[in-house]
Image: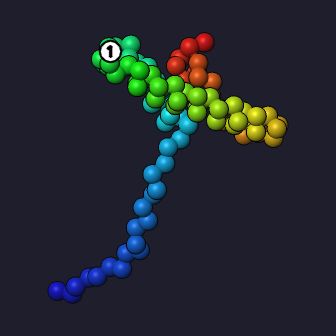
Amino acid sequence: MADKTETAAPEQTELPSVTVNDLVNVYNIIDLASKRGAFQANELSSVGAVANKVKTFVDHVQAAQKAAADAEGGEKADVKDDKEDKGEE
């Protein structure tokens, strides 16, 4: 039997990344979990602090993306409104 040795190209591993939409989902998960009573009272302040920090960052990035899209004539307007993400109108 002939030994078939394949020379495979080294696999390139993807670097981990987090998108703004991932952070929107994190905020929505925290919001939903708090509404369902998943956190104890003594945990609420730290959970709320993280949720507020994520929300502030997302709002800032989305506003910057919207401003950049408006400056470019709206060609790359890939910004979603938070109400769309939550299914609100």
Name the quadrant of the N terminus.
bottom left
Looking at the rendered structure, the secondary structure element under dot 1 is: helix
Residue on which the image places disc 1? 41
How far across and how far down the image is residue 41, in percent? 32, 15
Name the quadrant of the C terminus.
top right
* Residue 31, picture quadrant: top left
How far across and how far down the image is residue 51, in percent? 47, 26
User: Residue placed at 72% from the left, 33% from the top?
Assistant: 66
**Residue 77 seen in the current view:** no
User: Residue placed at 28% from the left, 82% from the top?
Assistant: 5
Image position of 52 (left or right of 9): right
In the picture shown, does residue 3 fall above or below 61? below
Residue furthest left as drawn = 1
Image position of 64 (left or right of 29): right
How far across and how far down the image is residue 52, in percent? 52, 25
* Residue 11, picture quadrant: bottom left
In the picture shown, does residue 59 fall above or below 8? above
User: Residue placed at 40% from the left, 72% from the top?
Assistant: 10
Q: Amino acid at mark 1?
A: Ala
User: Foreground residue, 52 or 13?
Assistant: 52
**Residue 34 seen in the current view:** yes
